[in-house]
Image (cartoon, rainbow, N blue to C red):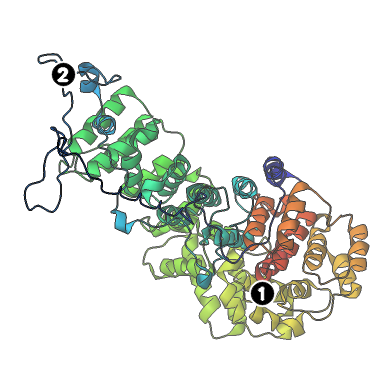
């Protein structure tokens, strides 16, 4: 095991060792209320009134002198609160509670701090009748493709916490990314012993690590802002910055006030003052921030430009990029939001984070969005249909975008050319020759599905099948079975992609595939055997035979493999998905081992996520 996968597993493994007790997912969650709230104790029986007695005439009963008497004929007795300091010595100074600030300290308090001191700071930003319950948090119900609501209700909180906390980077697999995003966005009940807000915060932070900032923002917004914890605030602010939705963070900034003291939080507060109608206060705070140099000059200038969009002053802010040698999420987000031009030298050196954000930022020019379109498609952020829509806009645009315009023109030919030979030639051009980018194969998924299977195109069958399966078009891919010779790569992909298979794969075609495998260290063969074994499509004896021949060991134990196997044995899809995400982190398939692939595919297949298991196995062979 190499690279980031090993690092993440070592970090996640120590945390996952905190708990190894699993229980079967229940149909309904247990109540999260403390003992006694479900079945309240019966109210005590009223004390019986004392029996009337005859009082001596010489001692009549009278009301106390200081108790007000009801007015004649009134049906109720008014409640009168006693005045403070009754009996105090006239002229003596009133006593004040201790701990109050001095007059000088009060004068220097920020208005928010003063509101908090006096108890005037609001705790919620919506009326009580409109607040939402926390029994279920998420975006996708089971009817919408989400996982069962009670999947984690009775699972150990420590294990769920460690699994989500162990997701700290992108997935090597496009289909693994799609599967994990679905699991993180599902509407779920929090595990027993975990606060629902913490559960939401952990999922928001994991989505941010995947680059799914829009989904993370939507998940955070499913929780009332008044219920946010510090962890959810941090994750939500990162998601708002990732989507250039700075004002979206204002409810949390206003309610949480001084919860943070870092420069970014101070600039956010000033921006939110401007959009709350306090333009003078915002300008004063940002001027002081600029003068005190709490952050680099460009960061404060961008905050001033953004805040100025809310006021009437229309104060001109000149952005000085000279001396700025790198982009940060804050700079990119604010510059994108206000339409400021970022110097080319900064954009050219920008990493994949910025390219993938650009692909999903509708406010950016199409030329900038196209730079990250293929990256986003390869990772799974953009679907095949979404990335084709982007290239369709590039084709329709009158200006020349360079390479994206050429690709868009060839992509159109791949879909609509009347001659199959011309369509196939266009598809090959989009793929990019011998050194093919898997993200470009996502572009042609539906164009490949339109190709009629034939002997003339048998040499392209494997690539066409791989392209179709980037979008999950397994039924279309299987129509190529008559033109996929036994032991070829096309045959291997179809053997994994089949929804069901009656007979196990025999050693004959497997031998042919292994003998013709030219990949480094025969990784394609290793992944094929691991995938078939995980899907139970080869028997144990055949598995052992190829383990020995390929020099791999499938099913070897580790803390992570034991946990994902145990989660599969109790048929818990959500926990399996989270643990699979821990095992698929990395930037290249070189970082995936056949042993990990076997455990992931096997566990997903056993809990009913067989479609995802098959597509991950196919992707491993296609990209190995």
Q: Where is residue 437 in the image (x, y as percent from the top left)?
A: 63, 61
Q: Which one is nearer the viewer's eye here, 137 or 615?
A: 137
Q: Which residue is drawn at 37% across and 48% down?
A: 225
Q: Position of residue 230 (x, y in %)?
A: 45, 40
Tell us which disc is closer to us: 1 or 2.
Answer: 2
Mark 1 / mark 2, whichever is N-terminal = 2
Query: Can residue 172 be spotted in the picture?
Result: no
Q: Which one is nearer the viewer's eye here, 417 or 379?
A: 379
Residue highlighted by disc 2: 88
Residue highlighted by disc 1: 464
Q: How crowded is mark 1: few (under 14 residues within 10 Å), some or many (20 or more)?
A: many
Q: In which quarter of the image is the C terminus?
A: bottom right
Q: Where is residue 119 in the image (x, y as percent from the top left)?
A: 27, 35
Q: As displayed, is residue 517 above or below residue 54? A: below
Q: Which one is nearer the viewer's eye here, 117 or 43?
A: 43
Q: Residue at x 81, y 70 (%)?
A: 536
Tell me whether circle 1 and circle 2 mark residues in contact (CB < 8 Å).
no
Which label number is shown at residue 349? none
Q: Where is residue 56 in the image (x, y as percent from the top left)?
A: 19, 39
Query: Can residue 189 be spotted in the picture?
Result: yes
Q: Quadrant of residue 149?
A: bottom right
Q: Quadrant of residue 110?
A: top left
Q: As displayed, is residue 274 above or below residue 65? A: below
């Amino acid at each position: 095991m190499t690279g980031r996968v090993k690092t993440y597993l070592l970090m996640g493994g120590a945390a996952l060792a905190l708990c190894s007790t699993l229980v079967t997912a229940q149909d309904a969650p247990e109540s999260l209320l403390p003992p006694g709230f479900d079945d309240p104790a019966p109210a005590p029986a009223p004390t019986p009134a004392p029996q009337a007695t005859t009082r001596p005439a010489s001692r009549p009963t009278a009301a106390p002198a200081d108790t007000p008497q009801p007015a004649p004929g009134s049906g109720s007795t008014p409640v009168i609160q006693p005045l403070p300091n009754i009996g105090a010595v006239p002229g003596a100074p009133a006593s004040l509670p201790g701990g109050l600030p001095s007059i000088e300290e009060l004068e220097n308090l920020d208005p928010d701090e003063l509101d908090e001191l006096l108890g005037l700071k609001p705790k919620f930003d919506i009326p009580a009748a409109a607040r939402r319950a926390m029994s279920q948090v998420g975006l996708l119900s089971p009817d919408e493709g989400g996982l069962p609501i009670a999947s984690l209700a009775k699972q150990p909180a420590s294990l769920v916490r460690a699994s989500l906390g162990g997701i700290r980077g992108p997935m090597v697999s496009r289909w693994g990314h799609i599967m994990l995003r679905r699991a993180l966005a599902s509407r779920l009940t929090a595990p027993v012993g975990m606060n629902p807000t913490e559960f939401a915060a952990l999922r928001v932070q994991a989505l941010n690590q995947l680059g799914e900032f829009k989904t993370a923002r939507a998940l955070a917004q499913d929780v009332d802002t008044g219920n946010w914890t510090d962890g959810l605030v941090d994750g939500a602010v990162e998601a708002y910055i990732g989507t250039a939705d700075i004002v979206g963070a204002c409810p949390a900034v206003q309610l949480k006030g001084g919860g943070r003291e870092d420069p970014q939080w101070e600039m956010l507060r000033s921006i939110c003052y401007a959009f709350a109608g306090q333009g003078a206060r915002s300008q004063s705070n940002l001027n002081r921030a600029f003068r005190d140099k709490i952050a680099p000059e460009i960061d404060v200038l961008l905050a001033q430009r953004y805040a100025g969009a809310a006021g009437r002053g229309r104060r001109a802010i000149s952005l000085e990029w000279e001396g700025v040698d790198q982009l940060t999420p804050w700079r990119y987000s604010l510059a994108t939001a206000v339409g400021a031009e970022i110097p080319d030298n900064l954009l050219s050196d920008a990493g994949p984070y910025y390219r993938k954000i650009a692909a999903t930022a509708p406010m950016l020019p199409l030329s900038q969005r196209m730079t990250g379109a293929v990256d986003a498609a390869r990772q799974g952020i953009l679907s095949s249909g979404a990335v084709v829509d982007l290239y369709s806009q590039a084709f329709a645009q009158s200006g020349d975008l360079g390479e994206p315009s050429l690709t868009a023109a060839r992509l159109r030919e791949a879909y609509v050319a009347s001659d199959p030979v011309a369509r196939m030639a266009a598809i090959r051009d989009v793929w990019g020759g011998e050194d093919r980018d898997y993200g470009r194969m996502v572009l042609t998924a539906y164009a490949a599905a339109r190709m009629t299977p034939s002997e003339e195109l048998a040499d392209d069958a494997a690539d066409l099948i791989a392209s179709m399966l980037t979008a999950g078009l397994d039924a279309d891919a299987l129509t190529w079975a008559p033109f996929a010779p036994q032991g070829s790569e096309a045959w291997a992909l179809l053997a994994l992609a089949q929804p069901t298979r009656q007979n196990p794969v025999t050693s004959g075609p497997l031998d042919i595939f292994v003998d013709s495998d030219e990949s480094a260290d025969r990784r394609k063969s290793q992944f094929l055997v691991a995938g078939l074994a995980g899907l139970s499509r080869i028997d144990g004896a055949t598995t052992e035979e190829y383990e020995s021949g390929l020099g791999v060991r499938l099913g070897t134990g580790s803390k992570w493999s034991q946990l994902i196997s145990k989660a599969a044995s109790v048929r818990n899809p959500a926990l399996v998905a989270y643990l699979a995400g821990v095992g698929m982190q990395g930037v290249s398939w070189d970082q995936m081992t056949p042993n990990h692939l076997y455990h992931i595919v096997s566990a997903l297949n056993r809990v009913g996520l067989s479609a995802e298991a098959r597509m991950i196995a196919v992707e491993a062979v296609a990209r190995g």
